Image (tube, rainbow, N blue to C red):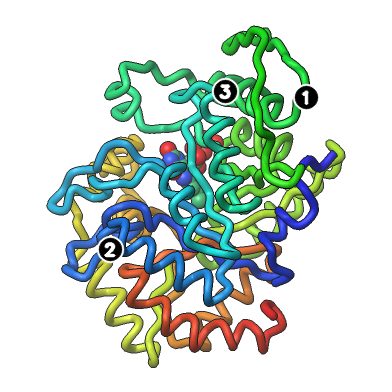
Amino acid sequence: MQTTAPGRSEFHSRNRLKLGLFGANCSSGRAVTKVPERWSGSWPDCLRLARMADDAGIEFMLPVARWKGYGGDTDYQGETLETVTWAAGLLAATKRLTVFGTVHAPLIHPLIAAKQFVTADHIGEGRFGLNVVCGWNEDEFTMFGATQRDHATRYEHAQEWLDAVKLAWTREDEFDFDGRFIQLKNARAWPKPFGGGQPIVMNAGVSPAGQGFAIRNCDALFSYAPRDKLEEFAAHVARVKALARDGGREIDVYTVGVVTCRPTSSEAEAYYRHCVIDNADWAAVDRIMAMRGVTRQSHPDDFELLRLHQANGLGGLPIVGDPDVVAQGMAELAKAGASGIAVSFVNYVEELPFFRDEVLPRLTRLGLRG
Ligand SMILES: Cc1cc2nc3c(=O)[nH]c(=O)nc-3n(C[C@H](O)[C@H](O)[C@H](O)COP(=O)(O)O)c2cc1C
């Protein structure tokens, strides 16, 4: 049974390929680069970006929940705006955009979280979305004095947490919740989400436990599309949708892209090389890799390739070229079954106008956007 109100999972648009901006609440966004024009992540820049995106018909903004920078020369993502308050501010300043909050289920009480989401949802008149994450970075948990649960248990906890949040969103009476991890007594939560619906819920799990969580609970699963292996991505989308249908639900699969678009492909490729290779913050890249247990010793054959993927938007698919190439790259992702793409740029505000003016009309001509 689909719980989201009609229209919400459409992100208030009928476009076949939805577009979002990913990671703008963090310093440097998704680009682990030292170039001076890298993204500030400041509030005034985020606000300018959100208004520009709203006017351009971009469907959503998806922030990253990060509590501790990655170090390196730039202290990559060392400054991050907290995502639910960030969403609330942006929702107040926009008209159509869906803005997600990205929330670590283990770090916040579900009744507090549920009310924060409802508050943001009222501010945005039904445009708040929730990205549930369980966390993967031990260092961040240590900072909170919290212990990271083992992987499978993380998602068992997240299931209870989301069940409790949804009870707070829907129950008209007082309720108890007696879970393995969460206990609530005589709980009540008013008001309910805006207009009788519920916020869109997404997750970006990769493991079977993470994807199972999305399939059981979420309106959207965000998955990386492997480069040059779009048929694998297409099979993944088909499998996820079929599993959701087996459980009586519908789910959309979105993906993540890192866009470098310039008037000519050679300019785009040169800029990509300049940011992602010649001026990458390799010290930060290597720390991120080490946190994930990826070292030259553990991955002797593909370490350099993995390093490059990390420098380039932490693994999002690079979409580099002139507007025709970029539009075509996006069309191929749509053909493989992606309902939308969350993109990042080195500097979102400087690069979005060219993308809006040149790529969006091409996507319209390709029948992917209205
Ligand atoms: C689009 C996207 C957004 C994500 N956002 C965050 C985030 O903000 N914070 C975080 O700790 N993890 C984030 N993750 C990590 C996922 O929540 C998830 O933990 C990761 O993909 C590994 O999957 P697994 O938990 O099933 O092992 C994100 C992943 C993707 C693909």
Q: Is residue 174 above or below residue 212?
A: above
Circles 3 and 1, Cβ within 8 Å, touching? The answer is no
As drawn, the label of residue 53 is none
Q: In which quadrant will I find the C terminus?
A: bottom right
Q: Which residue is mark 1?
A: 172
* Local SS, label 3: helix
Does the rendering let one see residue 8?
yes
Q: Which residue is mark 3?
A: 111
Distance from Cα at disc 3 to Cα at disc 2? 34 Å
Circles 3 and 2, Cβ within 8 Å, touching? The answer is no
Badge 3 or badge 2: first in the primary sequence: 2
Mark 3 neighbour class, 10 Å CA radius: few under 14, some 14 to 19, many 20 or more: many
Q: Is residue 186 above or below residue 90?
A: above
Distance from Cα at disc 1 to Cα at disc 2? 44 Å
- Check mark 1 vs ligand 1: CB closer than 8 Å? yes or no: no
Rendering coords of residue 110 (x, y %): 56, 24
Distance from Cα at disc 3 to Cα at disc 1? 15 Å
Rendering coords of residue 355 (x, y %): 46, 81
Select label 1 or label 2 by which is in front: 1
